[in-house]
Image (tube, rainbow, N blue to C red):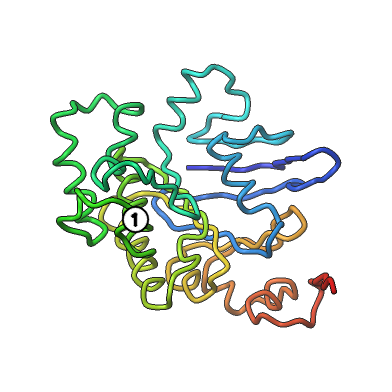
């Protein structure tokens, strides 16, 4: 579905993406790992065109989306994507139900009369019931994450981009979120791109894994190949070792 070729992104003199090549297969979960500042979030923001690439191609169903300029065409592109932000990004002033259906007004032609039904259905998909009238402040961190995911699902995206979906969650809730990602793949057939530092979750959910380092993909392979690779960068990151080619800067 998505082919990324020699993708580049700069912020002033800082080169974040230095020629990324990656294939994201239809209906699979592709997980992108790598240290902080290696360009993972930048990459998925380029895919959805929240950021403008500075070079290379992003082919979605064969069409290069890096040259889309018109607002109408960008809106059409983004309708096929859902983005789960790292912090959830719920609106505190709205109820849970209103949060879930927020995007329907702007991204779909769904009648307002159907909003309540859709909110109930999507919340049930993520394991939440009868909370439509609560406010985000009344929810736990794990519940907020699931409400945010229900909001993504409300517009029926073909691709879901997850930015650190298990960040800040306890181990049990992290496992629940990981199971949700896999279940949604099977139930809805969605393509998923997941950024994570959580290696346990990555190995559980992924069909394909890719590691970014210094703005390039060091390895993209099946989960089974990732586990047995001899690539020194990947091995060091997976093992969480301080010894290896990845050098960490420690400031006193």
- Quarter holding the C terminus is bottom right
Question: Residue 228's quadrant in the figure?
Answer: bottom right
Question: Residue 67's quadrant in the figure?
Answer: top right
Question: Measured along the vertical axis of the image, is residue 175 above or below residue 195?
Answer: below
Residue nearest the viewer, comparing 99 with 157: 99
Relative image position of residue 223 (x, y in whole percent): 52, 70
Residue ID at (40%, 35%): 80
Residue ID at (52%, 42%): 2
Q: What element carries label 1?
A: helix
Q: Name the residue under label 1.
A: 137
Q: How many labels does the image show?
A: 1
Residue ID at (53%, 29%): 63
Relative image position of residue 139 (x, y in whole percent): 31, 60
Left or right: 101 in relation to 202: left
Left or right: 187 in relation to 159: left
Question: Measured along the vertical axis of the image, is residue 100 above or below residue 37?
Answer: above
Left or right: 220 in relation to 222: right
Residue nearest the viewer, comparing 97 with 8: 97
Relative image position of residue 100 (x, y in whole percent): 29, 43
Left or right: 187 in relation to 82: left
Relative image position of residue 249 (x, y in whole percent): 83, 70
Q: How dense is the environment of label 1, judged by Cα within 10 Å: few (below 14), some, or many (20 and up)?
A: some
């Amino acid at each position: 579905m998505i082919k990324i070729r020699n993708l580049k992104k700069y912020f002033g003199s800082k080169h974040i993406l230095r020629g990324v090549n990656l294939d994201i297969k239809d209906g699979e979960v592709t997980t992108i790992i790598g240290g902080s500042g290696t360009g993972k979030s930048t990459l998925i923001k380029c895919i959805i065109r929240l950021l403008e690439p500075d070079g290379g191609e992003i082919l979605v169903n064969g069409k290069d989306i890096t040259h889309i300029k018109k607002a109408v065409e960008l809106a059409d592109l983004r309708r096929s994507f859902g983005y789960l932000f790292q912090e959830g990004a719920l609106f505190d002033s709205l109820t849970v139900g209103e949060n879930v259906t927020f995007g329907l007004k702007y991204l779909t032609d769904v009648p307002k009369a159907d909003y309540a039904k859709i909110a109930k259905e999507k919340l049930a998909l993520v394991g939440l019931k009868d909370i439509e009238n609560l406010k985000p402040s009344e929810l736990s961190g794990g519940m907020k994450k699931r409400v945010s995911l229900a909001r993504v699902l409300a517009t029926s995206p073909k691709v879901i981009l997850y930015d650190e979906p298990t960040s800040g969650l306890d181990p049990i809730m992290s496992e629940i979120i990981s199971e949700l990602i896999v279940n949604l793949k099977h139930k809805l057939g969605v393509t998923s791109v997941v950024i994570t530092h959580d290696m346990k979750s990555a190995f559980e959910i992924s069909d394909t894994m890719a590691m970014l380092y210094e703005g390039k993909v060091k390895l993209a392979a099946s989960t089974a190949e990732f586990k047995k690779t001899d690539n020194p960068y990947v091995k060091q990151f997976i093992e969480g070792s301080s010894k290896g080619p990845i050098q960490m800067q420690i400031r006193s």
